[in-house]
């Protein structure tokens, strides 16, 4: 069966990518392929139970898609600078820790962030309850049934208020990660960072936005990894030490997610075990994508170019009154291990919008953009105000690559929301840290 061949070839491609990048586990291609490898594995394990029988076009789309993304990353790497590889392949510190810069937050700004997180949470929660109630439904705490619909339908003002709360949480995550790895900071600063982050995470849980839990976790692991490697160099032994530190964090995240699955869940899913839940969320997409490609699931037709891929942008135009009578996007559900699934991996949207070859071109472009940004960021051997800001913004968006096993969140970033987030990151980052950062360029 092609699913078995696809799994082994995907694993082989993943090892080639790792070897090419000196075992750097956080390159865009690794983050793109690794979760999809797990998805293919689950589809393979449940192939008989789910009647998975890949057609050759799906097989080719996935396999060539992985290669296209990697080619795109390599193009981005070359555009980022000719000597990027030599920078990350050696220990730039000569075996000593980098000193970095002094990163601190004033107490009054901590008070401001904590108060803002609490107020924004109340406003956001009330808005979601109102949206759900207006639709004639009863809102239930921690229930994700209506979370996505409610979140996308809150007003622009409420949405912007909540975006600021998100930025504060990510700034505190960066500050906490940096000070832990640099062994600096105070107990008060650690506590305040954790409080701000906890309020944000609680707001995610109470509104049932499970995807944001994964996004925040990916950003956290990525920040720790990059900061650790910037302090100790990108040599293979250092990366191995980093992975050993990251693995317990990943295991902890999985355990927490398992505990929370009985709290943050859709109605009727509380009795589903962890294996069934993970397999349906990480394996079913392969079969659904195959059904779409084979024609078992009807291929939708849209009047606008790239409608599914750039839906966020078109949605903004619709709310602005520039587009009338927008066509709604509906993904067909199918039950896997007692859980309904309606996501088709990253490849669905570009495949529907641009066809087979257009999908591969889009995949290459996505790899190019994230490859360029990644290598441009790690090429900088200095910790400065600007490099930490770049890390902060990139960490926020990199989870879109990781979530390729779920949906195409990468092209979704071609939107006004993404621009607003970048602007907020830049403004609030400079406000929170101000002149407390040492601007001297110390090699790390």
Image: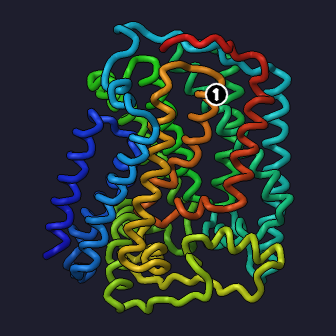
Camera-nearest residue between 346 and 245: 346
- Tally of marks: 1
The local secondary structure at tag 1 comes to helix
Tell me what residue is drawn at x 40 percent, y 41 percent.
Answer: 77
Tell me what residue is drawn at x 14 percent, y 67 percent.
Answer: 5
Q: Is residue 272 above or below residue 174?
A: below
Residue 8 falls left or right of residue 234: left
Of the 4 image quadrants, the one containing the N terminus is bottom left
Tell me what residue is drawn at x 60 percent, y 36 percent.
Answer: 392
Residue 308 falls left or right of residue 70: right
Tell me what residue is drawn at x 46 percent, y 80 percent.
Answer: 352
Q: Is residue 184 above or below residue 208?
A: above
Coordinates of residue 349 in the picture (x, y in percent): 48, 74
Residue 439 falls left or right of residue 350: right
Q: Is residue 116 above or below residue 320?
A: above
Pointer 1 residue: 386
The colour scheme is rainbow
Q: Tag 1: Cα neighbours inside 10 Å, few (<14), some, or many (≥20)?
A: some
| Image quarter of residue 60 | bottom left
Does the rendering let one see residue 273?
no
Coordinates of residue 132 in the picture (x, y in percent): 76, 74
Coordinates of residue 273 in the picture (x, y in percent): 38, 63
Coordinates of residue 264 in the picture (x, y in percent): 58, 60
Does the rendering let one see residue 133?
yes
Camera-nearest residue between 124 and 159: 159
Q: Is residue 107 above or below residue 302?
A: above
């Amino acid at each position: 069966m092609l699913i078995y061949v696809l799994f082994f070839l995907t694993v082989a491609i993943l090892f080639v990518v790792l070897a090419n990048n000196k075992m750097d586990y956080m390159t865009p291609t690794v983050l793109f392929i690794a979760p999809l490898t797990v998805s293919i594995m689950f589809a393979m394990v449940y192939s008989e139970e789910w009647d998975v029988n890949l057609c050759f076009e799906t097989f080719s789309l996935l396999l060539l898609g992985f290669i296209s993304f990697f080619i795109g990353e390599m193009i981005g790497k070359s555009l980022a600078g000719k000597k990027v590889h030599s920078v990350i392949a050696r220990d730039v510190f000569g075996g000593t820790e980098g000193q970095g810069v002094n990163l601190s937050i004033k107490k009054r700004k901590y008070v401001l962030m904590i108060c803002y997180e609490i107020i924004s949470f109340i406003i956001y929660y009330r808005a979601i309850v109102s949206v759900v109630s207006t639709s004639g439904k009863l809102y239930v705490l921690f229930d994700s049934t209506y979370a996505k619909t409610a979140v996308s339908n809150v007003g622009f003002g409420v949405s912007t208020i909540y975006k600021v709360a998100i930025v504060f949480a990510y700034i505190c995550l960066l500050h906490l990660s940096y000070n832990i790895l640099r062994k600096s900071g105070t107990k008060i600063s650690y506590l305040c960072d954790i409080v701000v982050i906890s309020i944000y995470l609680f707001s995610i849980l109470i509104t049932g936005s499970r995807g944001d839990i994964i996004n925040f976790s990916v950003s956290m692991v990525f920040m720790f990894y990059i900061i650790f490697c910037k302090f100790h160099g990108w040599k293979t032994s250092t990366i191995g030490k980093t992975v050993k530190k990251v693995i317990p964090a990943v295991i902890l995240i999985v355990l927490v997610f398992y505990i929370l699955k009985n709290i943050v869940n859709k109605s009727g899913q509380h009795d589903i075990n962890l294996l069934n839940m993970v397999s349906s969320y990480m394996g079913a997409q392969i079969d659904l994508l195959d059904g779409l490609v084979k024609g078992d699931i009807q291929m939708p037709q849209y009047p606008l170019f790239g409608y599914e891929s750039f839906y966020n942008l078109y949605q903004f135009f619709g709310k602005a009154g520039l587009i009338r009578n927008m066509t709604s996007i509906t993904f067909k559900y199918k039950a896997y291990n007692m859980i309904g699934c309606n996501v088709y991996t990253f490849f669905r949207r570009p495949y529907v919008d641009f066809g087979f070859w257009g999908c591969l071109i889009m995949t290459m472009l996505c790899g190019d953009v994230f490859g360029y940004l990644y290598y441009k960021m790690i090429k900088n051997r200095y910790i400065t105000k600007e490099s930490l800001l770049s890390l902060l913004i990139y960490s926020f968006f990199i989870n879109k690559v990781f979530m390729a096993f779920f949906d195409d969140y990468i092209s979704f970033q071609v939107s006004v929301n993404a621009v607003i987030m970048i602007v907020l990151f830049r403004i609030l980052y400079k406000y929170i840290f101000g002149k407390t950062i040492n601007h001297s360029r110390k090699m790390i």
